[in-house]
Image (spheres, rainbow, N blue to C red):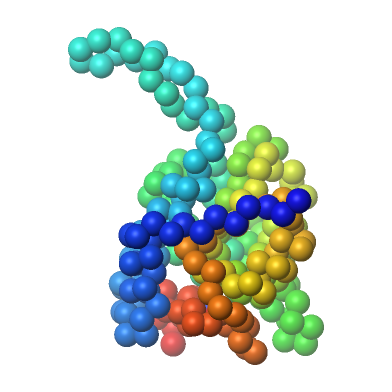
Amino acid sequence: MTAPLVVVDHPLVQHKLTLMRKKDTSTASFRRLLGEIAMLIAYEATRDMRLRAEPIETPLAPMTGAVLDGKKVVLVAILRAGLGILDGMLQLMPSARVGHIGLYRDPRTLEPVEYYYKVPGALEDRAVLVCDPMLATGNSAVAAVTRLQGSRPASLKFVCLLACPEGLRRFHGAHPEVPVFTAAVDERLNDHGYILPGLGDAGDRMFGTK
Ligand code: URA
């Protein structure tokens, strides 16, 4: 079974993504646009949230409303670029719990090495959304999801801004049951592990570190 790939091709998302891709877009605009797109992708990625009936009174009449059921969602950012998606999602879900996973690439083996891991406890009852803007080689995404699966969350989804065929193959090869939500699937990965045409280094562009 191959997990679904959801490309959020809403015109607002595509317009904002094109602005982000432009090389002259400022750090401030890049960060703001990433937050806005993250909100719109979060809207799709949370479509299956459970609701329960709640009797309420409007100023005019009693009625039965609907409110979110179950434990709060957990948003997990892969450091550091995942923080940009996290900020946008938190605007939409301010009560969400938050986890962070820090991974760096070992220059010798090129494998991801974990240097930080802090996530909320009792994930068994919670839906987890893992955030990282670029699904490039897929190695960090696979490592993060593998680590989280150890805590047996109620559900897991991966949310990014851009993916590429190589990253999707690697990710779904390891985690065929985890859906991926993205704004676009680009052409390919280059020899340095960057997505083409892509948008460059998401972390550097978000934090102005280059
Ligand atoms: N990480 C980035 O920031 N950009 C890419 O294109 C690939 C990985």
- Tell me: 76 left or right of 202: right
**Residue placed most toward the observer, 163 or 27:** 163
Residue positioned 49% across, 79% down in the render: 198
Residue positioned 67% across, 74% down in the render: 166
Q: Position of residue 71 (x, y in %)?
A: 57, 33
Q: Position of residue 31 (x, y in %)?
A: 37, 69
- Tell me: 66 left or right of 187: left
Q: Position of residue 80 (x, y in %)?
A: 53, 70
The residue sitting at the top extreme is: 62
Residue positioned 57% across, 51% down in the render: 129
Q: Is residue 82 visible?
A: no
**Residue placed most toward the observer, 16 or 131:** 16
Compared with 74, 195 (above or below) is: below
Compared with 200, 163 (above or below) is: above
- Tell me: 7 left or right of 166: left
Residue positioned 38% across, 15% down in the render: 64
- Picture quarter with the C terminus: bottom left
Q: Quadrant of residue 100?
A: bottom right
